[in-house]
């Protein structure tokens, strides 16, 4: 917004400086058209305005890092084997064997 206002102001100053043509009609000879040599003031004003525009601070560049997604590794739960007590079982022929039951 500041640049637009400053540019318009500079355009107005430059326009008024270049609009100072003088027409002199003398009683003799052709019409003489000349331009004043008052170009120093607009040149200084234009230089100052240009320096102000050139020295304006630019908007800071914002670098946004992409989001980091942290995914937890899967948790594997290993079921614990649960077993009953050993039982000794005797067959009719006199042999003894042991057994137990396990479950997960």
Image: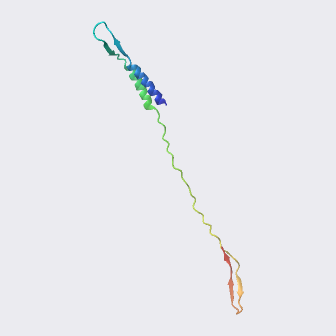
Q: In this view, does 9 lie above or below 82?
A: above
Q: Is residue 77 above or below residue 87?
A: above
Total labels drawn? 0
Percent coordinates x, y for residue 48 in the rendering: 42, 25
Q: Which residue is drawn at 35% across and 14% down?
A: 22
Q: Residue at x 41, y 25 (%)?
A: 46
> Considering depth in this image, is 28 or 87 the residue closer to the camera?
28
Q: Residue furthest bottom?
A: 93
Percent coordinates x, y for residue 74 in the rendering: 58, 62
Percent coordinates x, y for residue 53 in the rendering: 44, 30
> Considering depth in this image, is 11 or 48 the residue closer to the camera?
11
Q: Is residue 98 above or below residue 67?
A: below
Q: Residue furthest left?
A: 29
Q: Which residue lies furthest to the top in this view?
A: 27
Q: How did the renderer colour the structure?
A: rainbow
Quarter where residue 73 is shown: bottom right
Say whether residue 72 is left or right of residue 89.
left
Say whether residue 65 is left or right of residue 78.
left
Quarter where residue 47 is shown: top left
Looking at the figure, which quarter contains the C terminus? bottom right
> Considering depth in this image, is 69 or 1 the residue closer to the camera?
1
Q: Which residue is drawn at 32% across and 15% down?
A: 34
């Amino acid at each position: 917004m500041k640049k637009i206002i400053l540019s318009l102001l500079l355009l107005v100053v430059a326009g008024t400086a270049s609009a100072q043509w003088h027409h002199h009609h003398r009683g003799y000879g052709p019409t003489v058209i000349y331009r004043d040599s008052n170009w120093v003031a607009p040149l200084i004003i234009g230089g100052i305005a240009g320096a102000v525009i050139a020295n304006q601070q630019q908007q800071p560049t914002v670098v946004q890092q992409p989001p980091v997604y942290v995914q937890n590794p899967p948790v594997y739960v290993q079921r614990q084997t649960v077993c009953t007590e050993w039982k000794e079982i005797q067959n009719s022929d006199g042999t003894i064997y042991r057994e137990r039951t396990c479950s997960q």
